[in-house]
DNA sequence: CGTAATTCCTATCATTTCGATAGGAATTAT
DNA sequence: ATAATTCCTATCGAAATGATAGGAATTACG
């Protein structure tokens, strides 16, 4: 699965944040989106680490986007939330480098596929996931 | 993972068959490709069911392609071997149809992504995976 | 006919991945 | 002080996935 639940949750959280101007608490967002709060926490921390959202700690704290919604390509959000967006293990970084990489005729195909997917996901932004855009 | 080990094994088996004119026994193919024989068996049965290869039973039996190598798009082989090529669960067939499908703003994106991936994989054939094509 | 090599079929195991949960420390507005 | 929040680490449970086991059915060939 190239895009897992985790990644899709991330997109929904980001889209929800995009409707706010003030910082919003995750509890509220998670409830609104029907996402388990604790799971949402772990996802948002990935987003913070990737500098996609800003956090404000303490009471009345919360999260806030750092850019305009149209400046968040889906590729970037998913990349921050997911382990990997690679279409195969061969290009996923893990796997300690396949020993046949040098001669494998498939590898260039997988690389090109990853590139195609990345490009596709870069053509959409958070704005495309916000229902109220009519 | 959109393309799993199972799918990549399928491609390698098909590419190996593509180098033969006579029917070849799976034991031989699997050994040559370093694929566990029993696992290879289960993969090949999927390929037979999808009419991508022909089988000959009994002693001196084996498997044989039914078309020329350039007439096997990777999309078709992978589709036969894998559970699903969908990029998300949302478009994967299972999941008993998401209740929000009608209004979900992401769904059209996932559909378009699946279409893009399918089209990409249809631009390559077994020939592109055969080392000796120079 | 009998044997050996093969495809076919079903069931199960083992490992990894992934979604989710638990408990609590650190921070901060009021 | 208190309450609400973000932050951190560890773990659980279920599902997916790669792999294995054992044997039935079929067929070439001596």
Image (cartoon, coloured by chain):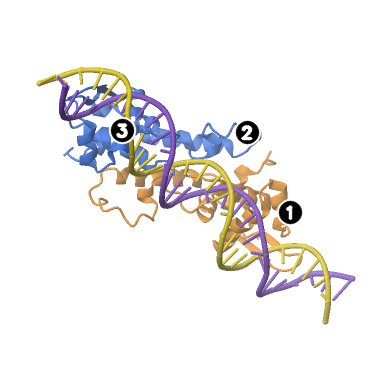
Chain colours: A blue, B orange, C yellow, D purple
Which residue is rendered at x = 62% and y = 54% of the image?
Answer: B39
Position of B84 with respect to D19 (left or right) is: left
Crowd around label 1: few <14 · some 14–19 · many ≥20 (10 Å): few
Is residue B15 in sight in this rendering? yes
Question: For the residues marked 1 and 3, what is the alpha-carbon distance in whole angstroms?
Answer: 51 Å
Name which residue lies at 48% across and 40% down: A87
Q: Residue beneath label 2, please? A: A101
Q: Position of residue D2 (x, y in %)?
A: 15, 26
User: Dots 1 and 3: beta carbons under 8 Å?
Assistant: no
Instruction: Please report, as a chain letter, where disc 2 is located.
Output: A
- At which x and y percent is residue A37? 27, 38
Q: Do the residues at pointers 2 and 3 share their chain? A: yes
For the residues labelled 2 and 3, the Cα–Cα distance comes to 38 Å
**In-image side of C10 versus A16 (left or right):** right
Q: Residues within 10 Å of mark 2 (few under 14, many from 20)?
A: few
- State whether residue D16 is above or below residue A18: below
Look at the picture and state if A47 lies above or below B111. above
Looking at the picture, tell me which residue is in the foreground, D3 or C11: D3
Please tell me whether mark 1 sits on a helix, a strand or a loop. helix
- Labels 2 and 3: the sequence-earlier one: 3
Q: Nearer the viewer, residue B40 or A120?
A: B40
State the residue at coordinates (25%, 46%): B104
Image position of C20 (left or right of B81): left
Q: Position of residue B22 (x, y in %)?
A: 73, 59
The residue indicated by pointer 1 is B28
Location of the C terminus of chain A by quadrant is top left
Chain letter of disc 3?
A
User: D18 and B45: which one is in front?
Assistant: D18
Q: Secondary structure at mark 3?
A: helix
Chain holding disc 1: B
The label shown at residue A41 is 3
């Amino acid at each position: 699965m190239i895009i897992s639940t985790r990644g899709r949750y991330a997109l929904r959280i980001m889209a929800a944040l995009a409707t706010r101007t003030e910082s919003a608490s995750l509890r509220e967002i998670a409830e609104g989106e029907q996402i388990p709060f604790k799971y949402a926490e772990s996802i948002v921390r990935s987003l913070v680490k990737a500098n996609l959202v800003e956090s404000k700690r303490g009471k009345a704290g919360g999260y806030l986007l750092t850019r305009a919604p149209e400046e968040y390509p889906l590729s970037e959000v998913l990349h921050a939330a997911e382990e990997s967006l690679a279409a195969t293990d061969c290009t996923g970084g893990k796997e300690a480098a396949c020993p046949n990489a040098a001669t494998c005729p498939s590898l260039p195909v997988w690389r090109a596929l990853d590139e195609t997917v990345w490009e596709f996901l870069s053509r959409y932004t958070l704005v495309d996931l916000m229902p109220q855009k009519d």
